[in-house]
Image: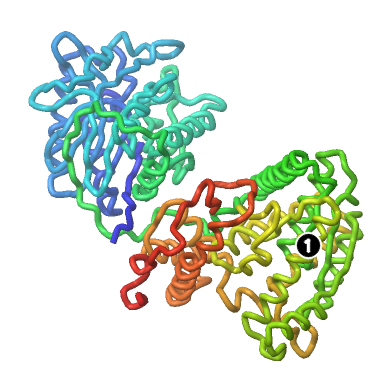
Amino acid sequence: MNYGFFRVAAAAPRLRVADPDYNAGQLETVIDRAVAQQVRLLVTPELSVTGYTCADLFFTAALQQAADRAVQRLAAYTAGKGIAVLIGAPVPYKNSLYNCALLLRDGQVQGMVPKVHLANYNEFYEKRWFASGADFNTVQMVNGVPMGSQLFDLGSGVLLGVELCEDLWVPQPPSGALALQGANLIANLSASDEYVSKAAYRRDLVAGQSARCVAGYVYAGAGVHESTTDLVFSGATLVAENGGILAEGERFARESVLTVADVDVEKLNAQRRQNMSFENRPGAAVQSCPVPNAENDLAYRMVDPHPFVPAADAQRRERCKEIFLLQASGLAGRLEHVGSKGCVLGISGGLDSTLALLVAVRAMELLGKPASAVLGVTMPGFGTTDRTYRNALDLMEALGVTRREISIADACVQHMADIGHDPSVHDITYENTQARERTQILFDLANKEGCLLVGTGDLSELAMGWCTYNGDHMSMYGVNASVPKTLVRYLVDYVAGELGGRTEEILRDVLDTPVSPELLPPDANGKIAQKTEEKIGPYELHDFFLYHFVRFGFDREKLAMLAEKAFDGRYDRPTIDRWLTEFLRRFFISQFKRSCIPDSPKVGSVSLSPRGDWRMPSDAAMQAFLQPDERI
């Protein structure tokens, strides 16, 4: 299977200025390298057949004829190779010369796209030699080949649009219109000279246009063997996908560069279909140019195991700062709106309630209120350990919030007696009795104190249904509901570093504590016996599944394949399959809990709010989402 991926490459081949025959040989070598790596689309630089810096030699019949011979030679070379190749060459037509991209496939020139925006400022004088292709909005036949603004259907759901160099740098690049007409892959044949700081700007431009178009973007720039009379070219090669750089080649290389990447076309199409602002706009002619798409091993694709968490330290700190402020601002806004004196929340000594407490204290700062306006309540029960109990009390003291301790043991024993449940039977009733007792206490305290009850549950728990219905599932406002468990840990770590001192010490110990609801008694040594990840699986896997399933709608096989790539060496395929089945099962049967969750601020690209991002029937069947042998 190719799993919706399409392998592309950007090349910066060796060349000789004004020597099409030599350049054709170099391009053939690059084509062979690309074919060996199962590339399906190869993009070469602007005017790669002749070189960009031929200047007035473009006017000569000898160069034009040599270029045409090289084009025909290269077209023939693609026969039977299963690859589409974009080359650049001057094309004479009627009274003008055009700077064109030519798509070669299966022995033929399939189409030509003329450059629209000609650079004619500072070091550029393109209008001296070439005419703009703006008049080719309607495709015309030139020497039996369609020429003009057009799309190329490469098969496998890939629709290719083409622009050339300066087209990208103008206020309205052609690729924007091509994307609205259906192009999900854009190729740019370029000859952009190099100077200080331009490389970073170019990289941002390519990434930004790929984001604006929700597309893959393959950029191939002219290399160091262009004329150095006045300029230096670096051979910049980049592949971007919806705002991110997938691959970038070495600049200033003396030998040919081939930069390969796997573009996830299925993901791009899913993102477009979810974005109703991304309208369909008919216009460009479509040429059918299918290339076979072989099985894809993702050799040229990095899959992030933690998609919610930036890998780079600086970026992660900045992301955590932003999210923490979003959470606090959301809570502050709600407190201000309802005129609440403060807020109430249950503090267990675990990660989620710790983050919620930190958010609540920050919200009070935003409102100009003291930390004492936060009432933190610890409610020890049958599963509470000394470690979490002490951390809860110590953290509240360190932050300066109002503390209160209310044991739920007697109330739970009485309640179980009332309903005729044996307290020695540690089943779901035993566990949920405690969760709902805590929630009742918190709601009543909130009413008594004129405060808002803040919920602590996170996005991962909502996805898995790992919460007690009308227990910790319910509050007056939830601050963590769109924060996944893997990110909760980094947020607490970020705040710990910001606060320092004794507070940081406590938070570090909270981070080292196993994740647990603590609803079952501790072990013989007083340690946590009920460990969530032993029961439902690793949160890092579930957050990975959650991100790719909700955001892109990937099927089970693709989810498993991506996880296998992302967690290579950490989880084998049987382990991934086991927990993926558990994730899908729990996700479907738990929608009824998500259908009635409290208000909460959205902080990331994935949210399960029934009022916003995720609409799903509570009784949807899961059969189509499981493997055949798992269906019931």
Q: Residue placed at 48% from the left, 30% from the top? A: 205
Q: Quadrant of the N terminus?
A: bottom left
Residue 227 in view (yes/no): no
Task: Quadrant for residue 239, please give it.
Answer: top left
- In the image, 550 versus 176, the foreground residue is 550
- In the image, 435 versus 575, the foreground residue is 435
Q: Position of residue 30 (x, y in %)?
A: 28, 43
Q: Quadrant of the C terminus?
A: bottom left
168 to the left or right of 201 = left
- In the image, 83 versus 573, the foreground residue is 573
Q: Residue placed at 38% from the left, 15% from the top? A: 119
Query: In the structure shown, which secondary structural element does the residue marked by tag 1 occupy?
Result: helix
Q: Residues within 10 Å of mark 1 (few under 14, many from 20)?
A: many
Q: Position of residue 507 (x, y in %)?
A: 80, 61
Q: Amino acid at mark 1?
A: Leu
Whether 124 is drawn above or below 420: the answer is above
384 to the left or right of 547 = right
Whether 210 is drawn above or below 89: the answer is below
Q: Position of residue 75 (x, y in %)?
A: 15, 37
Q: Position of residue 172 (x, y in %)?
A: 40, 21
Whether 193 is drawn above or below 476: the answer is above
Q: Which residue is mark 1?
A: 442
30 to the left or right of 395 = left
Tell which residue pokes out farthest to the left in this image: 144
Q: Residue placed at 64% from the left, 65% from the top? A: 470
